[in-house]
Amino acid sequence: MSCQILKIALDTPLDTAFDYRWVNPSDTEDLPKVGQFALVPFGRREVIGLILSVHTSTDVPADKLRDVIAVRSQLSPLSAAWIELCRFAAEYYQRPVGEVVIPSCPKNLRVIKPTALDKALKKIAAMAPATSLSAASPLELNTEQQQVVEALSAETGFKTSLLFGVTGSGKTEVYLQSADRILRRSIQTGEPAQILIMVPEINLTPQLETNIRNRFPDLHIATMHSQLAEGERMQQWLAAHSGKASIVLGTRLSVLASMPYLKLIVVDEEHDPSYKQQDGLRYSARDLAVWRARQLDIPIVLGSATPSVESWQHAATGRYRKLALTHRAAINASLPAVGLIDMERNKAPDGLSAPLIAAIKLRLEKGEQSLLFLNRRGYAPVINCDACGWISNCRRCTAFMVLHKPERRLRCHHCSAETRIPSACPTCGNVDLQPLGRGTQKIEETLQQLFPAARILRIDADSTRKKGSAQIAFDSVHRGDVDILLGTQMVAKGHDFQRLTLVGVINPDTALFSQDYRAGERLFAQLMQVAGRAGRAAKKAEGNASEVLIQTRYPAHPLYRALLQHDYPGFAETTLKERRDAGLPPFIFQALLRAEARELQKALDFLELARHLLADDSITLNDPVPMNIVRVAGVERAQLLIECASRAQLQAFLKPWVESLRKMKSRIRWSLEVDPVDI
Ligand SMILES: [Zn+2]
Ligand SMILES: [Zn+2]
């Protein structure tokens, strides 16, 4: 009878993995391996955990040690490198390792009865590996693209390349041809290879997925994003884990995909905030991807037209290699002209100024498409009573209830509370309640009045609640069934609309005066991105008449001046200088402790206590402050910002500090975010 001690990671809020005894009564079974799943008792339940290490002894007393029920030996073990990646993520972001390892694997792997797993594994076994790559029809590269592909293909070891390419410069083609070279080499040598391509949004995966499938018809492509059904998610995960899928296309969660033959990582739109997970393990998928590439000694490409200033700084210091695509790829396509409409001089009672209306009219006459971008959904951000000053506040949040006119509801975008629109003011009875400000629904109404014959489509979180409806909406734009497309940031990203020649941006100014120091950077990226939707295809006959019009009250603002010139480098350098002068990231490192309670004072008291738990001269622990939106869903929130000049010193402080915080066993709910993005 042989006996082993297995250290097993479970998805529990506790910080340790647990020791279990594995007994093999007849000595016939294979010894359990690191990286295998095992069914174990936990409290009164049975749960699936992952074997992190195998030992011959343990400090746990024999009477407390429980036995493993079964080892999932039908699944090949997760690699040591993958476990190491999870361990790093857990340590860096100060979470229990089980919370990284377990949720990053599909739920169906972790059910007690593995029938579905056995079935899925049979399907995977039946997948024939690619033995050839048929001559795909790559697009012809321009000189710049050619140089970038050559530069990327020259690397086999770890190197981070920042691919700075203007919108429409053909970054995707560069990714695909780089992937093509690696996969061809792999088929020739017989050494398996896999490529991970990450994108920020689920909405962008179908278009890219079609592209990739058309280009690599002989290969298995796996996709990973949060909207896959569980069965599908397991199938895709297994295709990657088995090595059968040569390319994995996914959103941020795919950074933790098991890919034993990973040879190249691409992070497209690397600046995008969606790469940051905002709850649980608050990780940056882009940063983890760079770590993973270094661990595996493989190249990684971060692509963007507006890189994050962090990445720009790394390129400036030589830590990243900068590769640039400065021209649009399509022949005759150039960057659209950007114009500013001064809203101090152009009044627009219904949200649209005369110059913008004239520009839309011109497109309608020519049979071209217009896109209007407004980052505020709903009809109006608030309704108010002129007689007594009442406004539609949410009762549970320090936020307004937003008017949604088609649904005849007031809706809070923070806690999702809903009420009917009151027929009269709740305080004074005045029946003349007025909407203040404008959202996408209001602009849609204005457009319908101005252009009754035009086909107008609104795309935002409200119009696309049903699964798959966003895709249907985008398809209709691509088919040309839409004259005027109107939407929030959902319409800004990724899509190439062939007949689109006008982009109008309505009131982006609020971000200029935000307390969040990253707001300017985000606005610039967003405007460049939405501007990039215009004129991506060459207009042969009349040359390129694409234009971007921005309605603003601050046409002299440096951000808009840089935008007029399409001058991202200038904008990035100014921003970096400001950050350096102000002592902000990337020149310092931060962590944020948040606490929430029924009463704000309790949250603040907890943070004050936390602040004095541990002294360290290299660490600045700022005063606890209420969060910008203090109350959400009846809970009040406060935060404590931790700053340090060195990443290593910050990490060295956080580990024991978080341990002490856990030991406090406070009833206050708290969470820690390392490298926070919303402060
Ligand atoms: Zn009133
Ligand atoms: Zn609310």
Image (cartoon, rainbow, N blue to C red):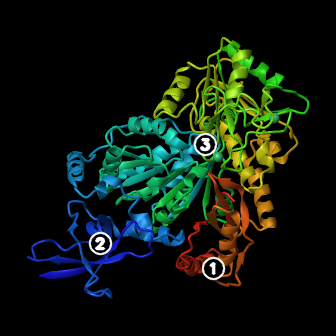
If you read the primary sequence from the N terminus, does the residue marked by circle 2 or circle 3 appear first?
A: 2
Question: Residue 413 placed where, x, y %?
Answer: 63, 43
Q: Which mark is residue 34?
A: 2
Question: Residue 120 placed where, x, y %?
Answer: 24, 48
Q: What is the CA distance from the residue labelled 2 to the residue labelled 3? A: 47 Å
Neighbours of disc 1 within 10 Å: few (<14), some (14-19), many (20+):
some
SS assignment at label 1: helix
- Classify residue 95 as left or right of residue 6: right
From the image, state whether disc 1 or disc 3 is nearer to you. Answer: 3
- The three-letter amino acid code for the residue at tag 2 is Val
Q: Is residue 544 visible?
A: no
Answer with the quadrant where ligand 1 appears in the image: top right
- Classify residue 561 as left or right of residue 163: right
* Residue tagged 1: 649
Q: Is residue 447 visible?
A: yes
- Check the image and report above or below for 233 versus 603: above
If you read the primary sequence from the N terminus, does the residue marked by circle 1 or circle 3 appear first?
A: 3
Neighbours of disc 2 within 10 Å: few (<14), some (14-19), many (20+):
some
SS assignment at label 3: loop
Q: State the residue in front, 282 or 544.
A: 282
CB under 8 Å between discs 2 and 1: no
- Check the image and report above or below for 14 versus 200: below
Asked if the residue at label 3 sits under 8 Å from ligand 2, the reply is: yes
